[in-house]
Amino acid sequence: MTTHQSVLILDFGSQVTQLIARRVREAGVYCEIVPFDKGAAAIKALDPAAIILSGGPASVIAGSSPSAPDEAFTHGVPVLGICYGQQTMVNQLGGRVENADDREFGRAYIDILKDAPLLDGVWTVGAREEVWMSHGDRVMALPEGFEAIASSEGAPYAAIADVDRKFYGLQFHPEVVHTPDGAALIGNFLSKVAGLSGDWTMGAFRERAIEAIRKQVGDKRVICGVSGGVDSSVAAVLLHEAIGDQIACVFVDNGLLRAGEAEDVVKAFRDSYNIPLVHNDATDLFLDKLTGVTDPEQKRKIIGATFIDVFEAEAKKIGGADFLAQGTLYPDVIESVSVAGGPSATIKSHHNVGGLPERMNMDLVEPLRELFKDEVRELGRELGLPDHMVSRHPFPGPGLAIRVPGEITRERLEILRNADVIYLEEIRKAGLYDVIWQAFAVLLPVRTVGVMGDERTYEYVLALRAVTSTDGMTADYYPFDHDFLGRVSNRIVNEVRGVNRVVYDVTSKPPGTIEWE
């Protein structure tokens, strides 16, 4: 296998550490994320050409604060510290960090003080540039060899450089889109500071993933859970390419899919992918277990546990399996637990995150665990999946269960399916499907009074949701024009029995989530 130039990212628990990896990959450089406390071993094993220290929620002033291994600064390669990463670098190399009275959260502006290779071609001396900050502590004294190259009102050392040793620190976050030139700065660190050429592609990821699957699985059997979405389909095709007939794909129809979706899944696997597929219609089982359940976390856990039960039964039918494969993605992981196992906050439980019951005696294979949705789509195209499959909007593992707040019934699911069909149909007709990251309807546990045909109605409220995003970590609502919303609302109220009112969700992420539950 080709050996690629690599960057090691040491994770201190930031919610956006993986966005650093995204920017590095976009620059064509392979990278790995490792918890800070595993850093020394990772440096020895990976021999990285550069090291990046992530942000994190801790304070270097606290006695038990995490720190980078000494090897990060003695390995002889360029180092970039971001936010907490800058602070621990300064603290460990002999500078001083203090708690700040003037904290900076969100949009901020920095003044460029000096030229440096990190800023070359991006920012010039004397310019005032927009960045995104999130810090309470700040650097107040620099270690020997460092100088300030940018400052802000709340951070006199907003950007620092030791040009000779190729050590750089940024108090702001260049990895997020809210720092407009952030990707260019990371690109400069990789090319102009570290001298990396950018030789990594999705084809290279495919190569590494196949090797990793073969190494993990050996000659053992794998059962792959298929949901019908992009993630599980790409995972299945990748696994099939890696281990061939050692994999058995099982599609569990949980009764919570969109209209016609079960049929589409079966057809795709049998006709397009040429992968054997077991179709288990477990609708009654899932809906019976969800009867009377209204708490969204409980819904997710019931669905996850039931999936496991069904997979276990199917594994026995095919003669047993040693591994369960899933299409888990990084946004699922980071919302459930940080890449380092903490201390980032848990936003919600994901049904396919967190391991397997011990009774199954199976290990997990998750070849997409460190990818974002757009990267999965790119991998799907690399694997030859048809575009209509690859470009589908994300669909949650728990399905429509989390788009029906309150109690789930067959009647409410049918209402939602019928409305969702109309909504997506109108989006496609308007040429907006590929512009929007995710669009769907939500059936609210609310009834309102309406007038239809001069008669009083008392029926459900339906909410429409559409967002734009690049990775699912942040999102903005899509600004439909009112004519479009009026047309969709009119069709839904006229054509879907049980709905007499339609509203549109204009909440961004954060503070909301993309899904409602």
Image (tube, rainbow, N blue to C red):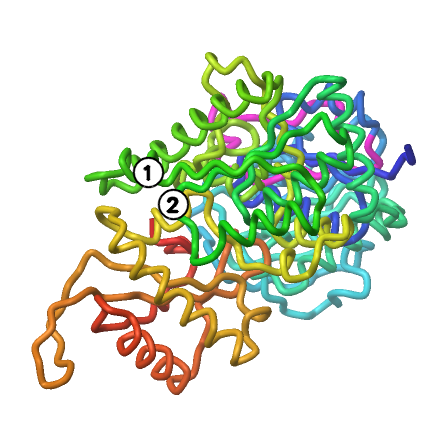
Mark 2 lies on residue: 255
Nearer-the-camera pick, 458 or 30:
458
Three-letter residue code for mark 2? Gly
Horizontal relation, residue 457 to residue 262: left or right: left
Q: Secondary structure at mark 2?
A: loop
Residue 130: where, in percent of width, then height?
59, 66
The prevailing secondary structure element of the residues shown in magenta is loop
Three-letter residue code for mark 1? Asp
The residue under the point 38% across, 55% down is 511
Residue 103: where, in percent of width, then height?
44, 51
As for residue 68 lying within the magenta part, the answer is: yes
Nearer-the-camera pick, 248 or 150:
248
Q: Secondary structure at mark 1?
A: helix
Nearer-the-camera pick, 347 or 303:
303
The residue under the point 28% across, 66% down is 462
- Distance from label 1 to label 2 (Cα)? 7 Å
Q: Is residue 212 above or below residue 300?
A: above
Residue 200 seen in this snapshot: yes
Q: Which mark is drawn over residue 284?
A: 1
Residue 140 seen in this snapshot: no
Q: Residues within 10 Å of mark 2 (few under 14, many from 20)?
A: some
The magenta region covers: 48-73
The residue under the point 84% across, 27% down is 47
Q: Is residue 279 above or below residue 487?
A: above
Q: Residues within 10 Å of mark 1 (few under 14, many from 20)?
A: few
Quadrant that contains the N terminus:
top right
The residue under the point 13% across, 68% down is 448
Q: Which mark is drawn over residue 216?
A: none
Q: Earlier in the sequence, mark 1 or mark 2?
A: 2
Check if mark 1's residue and mark 2's residue have beta carbons within 8 Å.
yes
